[in-house]
Amino acid sequence: MNAARSHSSQPSSTALAAAFAEQRQHTRTYLRQLHSEEDWFGPEHPALNPPVWEWLHLNWFAEHWCLRHAETGAATHSWLTDADRRFNSALLAHAERWRTSYPSLTIARHYDAYVFEAVSAAMADSRCSAYFAALALHHEAMHEENFMRRAQRLHQPFRMVAAAPLEHNDWLYCPAHDMTLGRTGGGEFGFDNEFGTRTVALSAFVISRAPVSETAFEDFVLAGGYQHRAWWSEPGWLWRERRRANHPYYWQRRDGEWYLADFTDMRRPSADRPIRYLNAHEAEAYCAYVSAQQASTLGKQVCMRLPTAAEWQLAYPQLQVLPMWEWTADSFAPYPGFEPGPYTDYSTTSFGHTRELRGHSPLLHTGLCRHDFRNFFAPQRRDVCAGFRLCHRAD
């Protein structure tokens, strides 16, 4: 049996059903603000899905794995006609999601109600295994982050999650250590990419206890950071030139000062908040900028960089980890011994061309706020609620 499913300890069926109900309520809260056809279907964008497709897809997913999968031993066909062709993300190309046929909103709401009630009942009486229940739950939580990214991009209201202010950012010294990443089975739910193990021999390093703040990154922008070629990697500079990026994506210049969009609000950068909505290239350029600043003021070269996933995980107990994702230096790759889970497309299609992120879900979903949870996005993505922290060798 795949290690990702051979757990000895799982949440109770009652707890899973309650968590699924809470998550569905968050989904429905966002959807209630959609009224017009434009709200439900637009705008077309390579980083977005039509909300109606996203909604029907997450229902299809829960129905498929909790009610229709061979191991659940239940229905063969979807309640919704032709759902497999239209709402299985593995079968319908992204661009076609604006052009496929859709049921009426009345039928879609009936489908949503049916799936929620049937899946909740299957979870509560353990007809659906804890693994597939958790898979459906975590999947819906990830799609709420998609709704969050859409709300941020379109300046729509969205539920706010309280976060502690940034602590004073000092440095944590970590001695050399052999760090083993991955799992061998047992414990709570995990995605397939978390299983298998890899041991990394870490040299001593220093890592910042808190992420980089908005005002610290503003200093980089004001110093001409987006125009200074020497601070950018080759792929980063090519991305910057191609996108004509001169500041963070959600920032605007007003009356000689920088402001940033936070859903429906525009505000000045804060020293108490971490910088977010940056891509890996922007984060790495900032690291090079700080390296140059320290060389100038201290008279010695300190090569600032992003931490590796192993360094981040080793230091995790002593870090201030806020509800956001954090870029690491690592390409997203399988651990030795990796086996695809039943949801085979989850990890395998992203290995090798995305970057690994660690941290906590910006929506504080419990299952996505684990020190060993591996998130992954293309390094050029700027719409992810992602920031970063600094790291360097302890020479």
Image: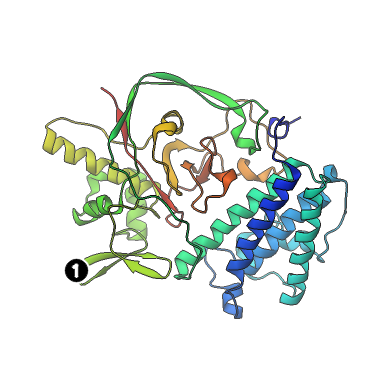
Task: Give the structural element (helix, strand or loop) at label 1.
Answer: loop
Q: Is residue 28 visible?
A: yes
Which residue is label 1 attached to?
256
- Whether residue 134 is situated above or below residue 10 in the rendered picture: below
Q: In which quarter of the image is the N terminus?
A: top right
Q: Quick check: 394 left or right of 343?
A: left
Say above or below: 384 vs 259. above
Q: In which quarter of the image is residue 249?
A: bottom left
In the image: residue 141, left or right of residue 281: right
Q: Which residue is drawn at 30% across and 53% down?
A: 214
At which x and y percent is residue 250? 37, 63
Residue 325 location (% of width, % of height): 46, 47
Query: In the visual, does 300 lie left or right of 364?
Result: left
Q: Which residue is drawn at 43% across and 66% down?
A: 263
Q: Please state which amino acid type lies under the numbered disc 1.
A: Gly
Q: Which colour scheme is used?
A: rainbow
- Quarter of the rendering occupied by the C terminus: top left
Q: Is residue 109 above or below residue 168?
A: below
User: Would residue 47 be seen by someone viewing this image from the given angle?
Assistant: no
Residue neighbourhood size for the residue with mark 1, other residues' Cα within 10 Å, grouped as few (<14), some (14–19), many (≥20)? few
The foreground one among 71 and 316 is: 316
Kindly give the residue lying farthest to the bottom in the view shown. Answer: 36
Above or below, 171 against 378 in this view is: above
Q: Where is residue 146 in the image (x, y as percent from the top left)?
A: 55, 59
Q: Residue 7 location in percent, x, y?
A: 71, 31
